Amino acid sequence: MRSVDEHGRRDGTPDSLKFVGNYPPCVQCVEVTNQTEQSFYDEANACWDTDCATTQDTLYAAWGFPPPQGSEYATIVDFGGKIYYKLDTGDVWLTRPLQITGVDSVTAIHFGYKLWLHGKDHPLEPPVDPEDRVMSWRYQVDYENDPDNIIKDGGGIDNIRSPTYRFSTNPNDPVYIDDNGVWILKIRFGVPFQLLAADSLALGVNAYRQYLFEELYQDWDAVDEAFRLTTMQLGNGWTTVIARDATDCILARSDKGKYHYFTHVRVPPDHGRQCFDDYPGEKAQLALNDFAAESEEFVKNFFLGILYPSGEIYPPPTGFWRRVARD
C-alpha cells in the first residue's frame, strides 16, 4: 500500500498494513426481578458471570388485597387481564389477537417482571457513553411448557433471530436503558383467576378445571388442553440473550449507525457516525448494523409459580433446572 496526503506527499505509511477490529461484546449477567426492585449488580464485573449464570431466579404470583410485597413476589400489572388461546392450533396470546375466529379466553391476572441485561463492549473498543455499552440485543423468553416460544411475553422482540433495538430512557416504557447503560425489558405472564384465587393448590386446580368444564366445554379432553395452554408460562423458564455492538439507523439511533470513509488520507475535523450526513471529502458509508459483532449466547434460568396461603406452590418445584445454550 502506498499513499499520499491531500498535498501529494508521501505520508510514511508502510507497504503493508494489518487491520484488526470489530471485537465482539460480551454478556455479564441477566437478572430476573419483579417490576419494583432495583438491580445492585456491579457493572465492573467480568464477562460471563458464573454465579449469575448458575443461579435460578424465582418469582411467585400470589393473591391478596393489597398484593403481597417482597422481592420474591411478581408485580401485578393488570387485575382485569385475559389469556387468549385456540384449542385446535395451540396458539396463546396475552393481548387480544386481531383475528378472533375460534379463539377462546379466560379471565387472568397479569403479573410483571424485569429482565436486566448486563453487558459491555470489548475493552479494545470501549464506549464513550454508558448507554453505548451494548448497542442492541437479541433475546428470547421460553418455558419448559412453551419451548417453541408460542407466547410472546413482551419487552422487545421476543425472538432470538431478530434484534431488539433501542430505545428509551423512560422507565414506563417496555424497553428502557438506565444511567449505567443496562437494558431493562418488562415482561408479563398471565395466571387464570380461578387457579390463583384459592387457599391451596388442590382447591385452585379443582376450581379452575371445574370452571373450564361447566362454563366452556363440557368435555374433559378440551378442559385438559385449555388448562395446559393457559398455564404454559408457569414453572421452569429461561431466557437466551446475545449482545450486539451495532444499532439500526431507522429503527433506533441515527447518531451512531454508520462508518464513513474518506477520499484523502486524513480524516477531516468534521466527521462522525451519523446515519444521514455526508461529510466533506467523504468517499462512501457503511451501515454498522450490517457488520455487527455479537457475543456468545448467555442463558438465564428462572422459575415462575403460584404461592398459595397454604404454602403450596403450583406447579410444584422439581429442584434446580438448568437449560444450557442452544445448539
Image (cartoon, grey):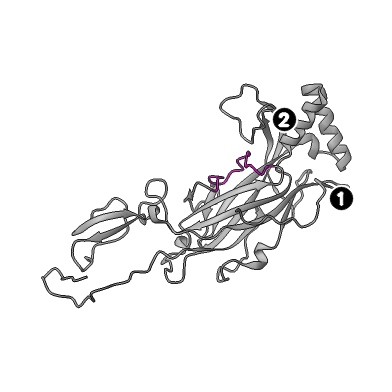
Question: CB of mark 1 within 8 Å of CB of mark 2?
Answer: no
Q: Which residues are magenta?
A: 146-160
Local crowd at mark 1 within 10 Å, few (<14), some, or many (≥20)?
few
State whether residue 35 appears in this view: no
Please tell me which residue lies in front, 19 or 196: 19
Please tell me which residue lies in front, 190 or 217: 217
Please name the residue that numbered disc 1 is placed on.
Answer: 311
Horizontal side, residue 162 vs residue 115: left or right: left
Please name the residue that numbered disc 2 is placed on.
Answer: 106
Horizontal side, residue 213 vs residue 324: left or right: right
The percent coordinates of residue 114 (x first, y second) are 62, 52
Tag 1's secondary structure? loop
Residue at image position (86%, 47%) is 309
Relative to 248, does residue 41 appear above or below in the rendering?
below
Residue 154 covered by magenta stretch? yes
Q: Residue 196 sits in which quadrant?
A: top right
Q: Residue 47 sits in which quadrant?
A: bottom right
Residue 214 covered by magenta stretch? no
Q: Residue 193 sits in which quadrant?
A: top right
Relative to 100, does residue 199 appear above or below in the rendering?
below
Instruction: Give me the C-alpha separation between circle 1 and circle 2.
Output: 25 Å
State whether residue 281 appears in this view: yes
Residue at image position (51%, 60%) is 295
The percent coordinates of residue 3 (x first, y second) are 18, 70
Relative to 281, does residue 235 appear above or below in the rendering?
above
Give whichever of discs 1 and 2 has the lower sequence position.
2
Secondary structure mainly formed by the magenta segment: loop
Please tell me which residue lies in front, 312 or 70: 312
The kind of residue tagged 2 is Val
